[in-house]
Image (tube, grey):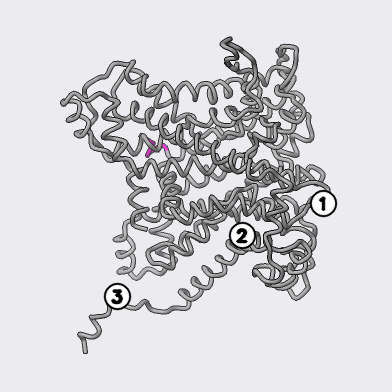
Amino acid sequence: MSSTITTAEVATTPQKHPKSKVKTKSWKGLAFTSPAILLLTIFFFVPVILCFVLAFTNARLISPEPARFTGLDNFQRLFTDPLFWKSLRNTLYFTVVVVPAQSALALLLALLVNGQGRGKNFFRTVYFVPVVTSIVVVSILWRFMYAPDGLVNNLLQAVSFNVIQGTDWLSNPSTAMPAIIFMSIWQAVGFHMVIWLSGLQTIPGEQYEAAAIDGATAWQKFRYVTWPGLKDTRTFILVTITIAAFSLFAQISVMTNGGPLDATSTVVFQAVRTGYSQQQTGYASAISLFLFVLVLTVSLVQRYLSRDKDLR
Amino acid sequence: MTASHSAAPRPRRKVTAGGIGAHAGRIVLVLFFAFPIVFMFVSSLKPDEQIFADLGSLRAFLPVGHLSLDNYQATFDKVPAGRFLLNSIVMSGVIVVLGLFINSLAAFGLSRMQWRGRGFVLSMVLATLVVPFETFALPLLWWVNKLPNVGFSDGILILSQGWLDSYKVQVIPFIANAFSIYLFYSYFQSIPRDLDEAAKVDGASWFRIYRSIIMPLSGPAIATVSILTFLPAWNQYLWPLMVVQSEELRPVMVGVSYFFQLNVEWGPMMAYSTLITLPVLALFLAFQRSFIGSIASTGVKG
């Protein structure tokens, strides 16, 4: 593990080296950065700007006629579209459950496998396996496991001595989203466990020793040493999980296709359905713009919360 | 007496109820995280009837009964799996290799050279970090359909419009990556500047400093960026779903849709899932420390 930690630390905590006072000609700097700038401009900045522009037009993916400016029509449609509100509600439902559950479980895992030793490393590796498994594969696998006569129901029956009979998880509007939430946490929690772990490494061991001398209990050590020491990690984890949760798509596409009765349609799923399947780029851009604003709000809140220690 | 005690390499940990509980928890969690994957591997070797027959017992997780590679045979009959694998390997490879070059070059320009406009470019790159792909995927879809193609045929320049249904539309948009630039940038900041200043005095060009001093010292950053660009490239799903129609251009993840017809054949499907998971899983187990380290390095400063 030691090699891992040094990698992480070197990559993320730049030591201060005095900057060179010699100025270089701008064109030389640009020569190094321009390939990346050019590609980022074409494939990031232009589409983001297009998102703002196309949202106010009737652009279609493939159309012989040029797009026309239609003012706020798309937004008027958006805010009166019951499917949009349903998708937004589903997305928020997913987010509100996944963010606290996944970050808490990830922290629990991190605490369980923190420290040295061959055994700990084995556990870390196993918990991380779902992360390197594609979410598409994971979704297929769980779709099979969630079937009426699938593994999940069999397991529930076995552990409850046939008291719980289970249901057809993905075809039942009230269980489809919880089933997807459970699976999504299973897949991604190892990722955030690793990030909590790297946060735990930054807490100096002396603080724990001092707490031990003062006779602190395990809970007190967690409450007064670990928890405050994880402040930055906490903000980072909450924000990354939130943004990832807003972008929920692959699970829906593979497992339920938005159903049953649109109970699992999400904002991104609806954007893809209108923008790709129905080719209404203008309307899809309006949906995307809404998502963009949502994501931006979250990251601005993060900026505000961690304003003391900024990136540079 | 005391000598025999002090010879013990480390003091034995006290066995507490909490310690036993934690260990039991760890083991239950191993089952929780590993069993679905084990189930996938094992089921890929069983005929459909046996998969269903075994569901009710622990046999579901054990390679027992009638085992064969028939499902794999069926997979290759049903899906051009070889082609899909090749597509994904080549496209992810190109994204990783070109990405390493272009993004480290940009990070070098931002980290080592002081020039007018540097701060502006750096802040532009950092500003892109929080925006997920899904927010601009649909405008991007419209946009790539407008991009021009330049080709030559019999010595004549041919211009056409639209990048849809090609390899390049699956590769070129993902080469430049703000996050990779940021990771290289932070790493380069930790390399002492005396090294390049000395080389500068000796008359080395900036590119030579990049190639002969900075990059050879950046092994860990190269490993991190490779892993963090390979995984999403291999797992591409939403984008190829929208931009590719031709079968021969498809990557592995899109191939799963072949199995969702009227009758889902689960055995072959598990075989296909295993097939597209194994390469990544093998890489992960071989470079497990680098994988976990690279994820860890994304977190601390964010």
Q: Which mark is residue B37?
A: 2
Q: Residue at x 71, y 14 (%)?
A: A67
Find residue B268 and report its horizontal and vertical position in percent.
Answer: 72, 54
Same subunit under labels 2 and 3? yes
Residue B189 visible in the current orientation: yes
Crowd class of label 2 (few under 14; some 14 to 19; many from 20; radius 10 Å): many
Q: Quadrant of residue B194?
A: top left
Q: What chain does mark 2 sit on? A: B
Look at discs 2 and 1 and give the one toward the viewer: 1
Q: Is residue A308 magenta-colored?
A: yes
Chain hosting mark 3: B
- Which residue is tagged 3? B10
Q: Nearer the viewer, residue B13 or B204?
A: B204
Q: CA distance from mark 1 to mark 3?
A: 60 Å
**Which quarter of the figure is the N terminus of chain B placed in?**
bottom left
- Residue range corresponding to the magenta coloring: A307-311
Q: Is residue B47 positioned above or below A25 on the image?
A: below
Q: Please, what is the three-letter code of the amino acid marked with disc 3?
A: Arg
Identity of the amino acid at label 1? Asn
Return the residue found at the far bottom: B1
